[in-house]
Each structure stands twice: as C-alpha cells, then as structure tokens.
Image (spheres, rainbow, N blue to C red):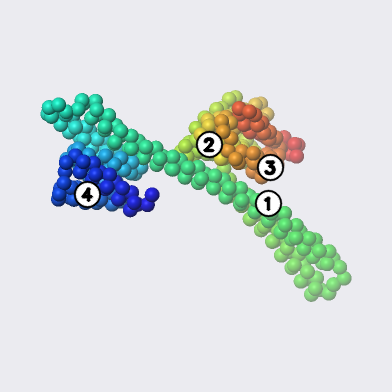
C-alpha cells in the first residue's frame, strides 16, 4: 500500500466511525483534515503525530486507525531515552484522561475496557514498531559484519595471488638476468644486465613487503578476540567466551593471528548460517598448545546456504593454521557445529610441523 493510499484509508475509516457516532457538518470535515495532516506528518515528525493522534482520540473518542498507525511509526523511530520518556508520558496522560472520563460519565464502560483499548491501540503498535526497528538494525549489523569479513578475506586472496604470480615472474627475470650477467657480454651490456637483475630483486623485495602488508596490516591477534566478540554481541549475536588453563603468550605472530581468524571465521559462519543461535568461544591452554574452538547450535530450520558452509573461507583458514604449525578440524553434527584449531605455543613446533 502506497503512502497516499494509507492516508486515504485512515481518513476514511476514522471519519466514517465519527460519522456513525453522530458527528456531521464542518466538525466532521475539520476532523478529516486533522487526521490527514497528522498522517502526512507521521514520517517526519512521528512523536508529534502520535501526540496529535492521542489528542484527537481524547476529543472524539475515536481515531482508532490513526492511533495504530502513528503508534507503530513512533515505536519504529524510538532511538533515545528522551523518546521513551515522551512516549511514556503521553501514554500515561492518555490513560489518566480515559479513566477520568469513565468515572465522570454515568453508565460508561468499565475501566478495564479503557485500559484494554490503550493496550490494543497504542501499546501494542508501539512495541511492534520498536521490534521491527530492532530487527532491521540487527540485520544491518549482521550484513556489515559479514561484509567486513568478506572484504578482509578478499584482500588476503589478492595478496596470495600477487605473491604467487608476480613473485614467480620476478624470480624468473632475476634468475635470467643473473645468468646473462655472467655470460660473454660487453662491459656495457653486463652493466645493463646487472642493473636489470638488481631492479628485479628490488621489485621482488618490494612485492614481498606489499603482500605482507596486505596480509597482516593491522593484523589482529589473540589479544583482539575480546573486541571481536564484543562487536559480534553488538551486532545482536549471543556469544559466550570461555577460557581454561594457564594463559601463555603465543610467541609466533602467525599463530596469534590464526587464533583470531579461527574465532572470526566461526562467528561469521554462525551468524550467516545459524543466526540467532547461541555461540560459544573456548580458549583452552595446554602445556604446549592452545586449543581454540567456536561452537554454535544448529538451527531448527537450516538455511538454504547451510549446505555451502565450510567452503573457501574454511579452506583458506586451514592453510593459515597449517602455516602456523597447527591443525584445524571441523565437526558438523546434528545439534552442534564446532570449529577447533590446535596452535603451538612456540615457533619451533610450528617449524617442525611444516
């Protein structure tokens, strides 16, 4: 339903109710104009429109559709404590006026009927609007979190491709230039070839530095897992972090970064494929290794993308953990999905493992 159609429907419905109640003439026309103006201002001034709807409801005893629409919009736009206070005060005043009218009107309806009217026509639309707004914000934060992880994953993939392709070509150029350098060339040619070899080696070094920067620029590690969990909680995920054993530093930066990526990948998969389920992040310190695990309950109704989980992201994560001398295991079950990584505490073990 378009905006204008909604305004027309509310004006017609509430005006018809007032006409059936015996109101006619210019009063009915003025009321229709007031309802139309209130509906027109609802999107830009939701709380003012809600207050106007309450005032019209008190004056006429009607405005049922107007109360529902403005209440929903006001609940949808609540974002600060001031909005909550204004809305609560307006509802309280509306309830007091209704109860006073019931007490002073002989033969009027019971007070509980008036309270039920407040709940149905005002409180429920307010709560519904607030719920819809929170769900939209939750989805927005989820999409932002997933987009951030995809962006970082793409950056690592580009860095890997650059290292494999350009690094290989530059190495070939350097080797061929070195071979020409020792060949039967004139002094000028040897000098030119030597400069070519030096330029190729310098380019290879710079490429290696750029790739490392792409892979590990501001590379988060074990100490950043708490911030990662906090961001996931802010996005609406239910995450619990547990730690056991004596915490020891991971002296290998690759292992520390791999631990962070394991938790990041586990949270991303849980948000993407099992949104709303509780997630548990565990850090278990062993004498010579750190066990990192991320577990989430399987959703009752698996999403259509669940079957594709554990693709390129988990494959790249397996390589990252292996490069740090660790092992990654995926344990999908009927009730729980668990991602577990074992990371050595010292680089010596990492070197032995590879």
Helix, strand or loop for disc 1: helix
- Distance between the Cα atoms at labels 4 and 3? 64 Å
State the residue position of label 2.
275
Helix, strand or loop for disc 4: helix
Q: Nearer the viewer, residue 154 or 275?
A: 275
Q: Quadrant of the C terminus?
A: top right
Mark in the foreground, 1 or 2: 2
State the residue position of label 1.
160
State the residue position of label 3.
315
Lower position in the chain sequence, tag 1 or tag 4: 4
- Distance between the Cα atoms at labels 3 and 1? 14 Å
Q: Is residue 23 above or below residue 3?
A: above
- Distance between the Cα atoms at labels 3 and 2? 22 Å
Q: How many marks?
A: 4
x and y percentages locating residue 128 in the rendered image: 37, 37
The image's mark for residue 32 is 4
Tell me which residue sits at (61%, 51%) in the image: 154
Mark in the foreground, 2 or 4: 4
In the rendered view, does 190 fall on the left or right side of 255?
Answer: right
**Crowd class of label 2 (few under 14; some 14 to 19; many from 20; radius 10 Å):** many
């Amino acid at each position: 339903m378009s905006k204008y159609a909604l305004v027309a429907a509310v004006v017609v419905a509430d005006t018809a109710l007032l006409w059936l109640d015996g109101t006619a003439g210019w009063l009915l026309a003025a009321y229709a104009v007031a309802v139309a103006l209130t509906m027109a201002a609802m999107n830009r001034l939701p709380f003012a429109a809600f207050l106007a709807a309450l005032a019209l409801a008190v004056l006429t005893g009607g405005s049922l559709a107007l109360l529902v629409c403005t209440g929903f919009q006001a609940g949808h736009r609540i974002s600060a404590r001031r909005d909550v206070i204004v809305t609560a005060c307006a509802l309280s005043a509306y309830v007091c006026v209704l109860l006073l009218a019931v007490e002073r009107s002989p033969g009027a309806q019971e007070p509980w009927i008036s309270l039920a009217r407040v709940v149905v026509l005002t409180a429920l639309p307010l709560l519904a609007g607030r719920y819809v707004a929170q769900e939209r914000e939750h989805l927005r934060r989820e999409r932002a979190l997933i987009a951030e992880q995809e962006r970082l994953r793409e950056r690592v993939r580009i860095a890997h491709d650059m290292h494999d392709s350009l690094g290989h070509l530059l190495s070939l150029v350097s080797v061929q230039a070195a071979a020409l350098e020792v060949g039967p060339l004139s002094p000028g040619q040897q000098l030119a070839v030597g400069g070519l070899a030096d330029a190729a080696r310098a380019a290879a070094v710079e490429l290696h530095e750029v790739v490392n920067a792409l892979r590990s620029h501001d590379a988060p590690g074990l100490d950043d897992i708490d911030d990662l969990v906090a961001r996931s909680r802010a996005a609406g995920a239910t995450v619990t972090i547990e730690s056991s054993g004596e915490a020891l530093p991971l002296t290998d930066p690759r292992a520390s970064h791999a631990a962070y990526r394991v938790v990041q990948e586990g949270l991303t998969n849980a948000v993407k494929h099992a949104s709303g389920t509780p997630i548990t992040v565990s850090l278990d310190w062993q004498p010579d290794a750190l066990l990192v695990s991320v577990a989430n309950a399987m959703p009752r109704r698996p999403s259509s993308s669940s079957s594709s989980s554990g693709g390129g992201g988990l494959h790249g994560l397996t390589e990252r953990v292996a490069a740090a001398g660790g092992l990654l295991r995926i344990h999908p079950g009927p009730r729980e999905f668990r991602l577990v990584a074992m990371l050595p505490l010292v680089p010596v073990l990492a070197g032995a493992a590879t």
